[in-house]
Image (cartoon, helix red, strand yellow):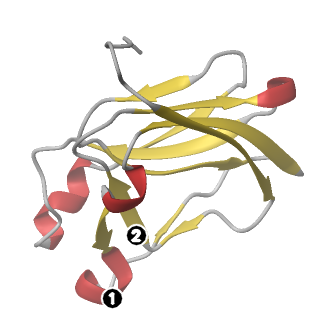
Amino acid sequence: MELRHGEVFHLNVLHYDRQPLRCDHLNRHHKATQALVALAGKPTLLIVAPAEYDFSTDDHLGQVRAFACDGSAGVNLSLGTWHWGPYPITDYVDLVNVQGKGFANDNEIAYLERDLGVVIEVVL
């Protein structure tokens, strides 16, 4: 992540306990990238889709991809990348989450279940 003069970032640590891997929505950010790093090498699952889709139709669902991350490296999401997770594959995960200033007002949501009647379930 490149820092520019005067840029402010928000850093926090998130804790997620293992839950069923059921994605009913995707998020994206237009003004700031987001970097996520799993602590203690915990494996996680991340769902992503390209920014050029808006999920206004179920035709866009074919662009969704799921990745198992082994915990050895972080993920930096490009501007506009749709995402869900990362969420733990094992018992839990603690994530370092770095987002740009104004992230709270920079969160677009695609409601897959509500608008398209779809829930993506990942089975490992």
Amino acid carrying mark 1 in the image: Arg
In the image, residue 120 sits, relative to residue 8, either above or below, namely below
Q: In this view, does 49 lie to the left or right of 40?
A: left
Q: In this view, does 6 lie above or below 108?
A: above
Residue at image coords 38%, 13%: 3
Q: Residue 25 carries which label?
A: 2
Residue 58 horizontal/vertical position (percent) = 17, 71
Query: In the figure, residue 65 lies in which quadrant?
Result: top left
Q: Position of residue 18 (x, y in %)?
A: 80, 59
Give the quadrant of residue 119: bottom left
Residue shown at the point (25%, 35%) measured from the top left: 79
Question: Looking at the image, which residue is at 33% across and 88% down?
Answer: 114
What residue does disc 1 label?
Answer: 114
Task: Residue 80: name its quadrant.
Answer: top left
Residue 67 lies, in percent from the top left, at 52, 36
The spot of residue 43 in percent (x, y) is 75, 34
Of 54 and 11, nearer the camera is 11
Position above or below: 95 against 7: below
Q: In this view, does 113 lie to the left or right of 41?
A: left
Q: Residues within 10 Å of mark 2 (few under 14, many from 20)?
A: some
Q: Is residue 58 left or right of residue 81?
A: left
Q: What amino acid is at disc 2?
A: His
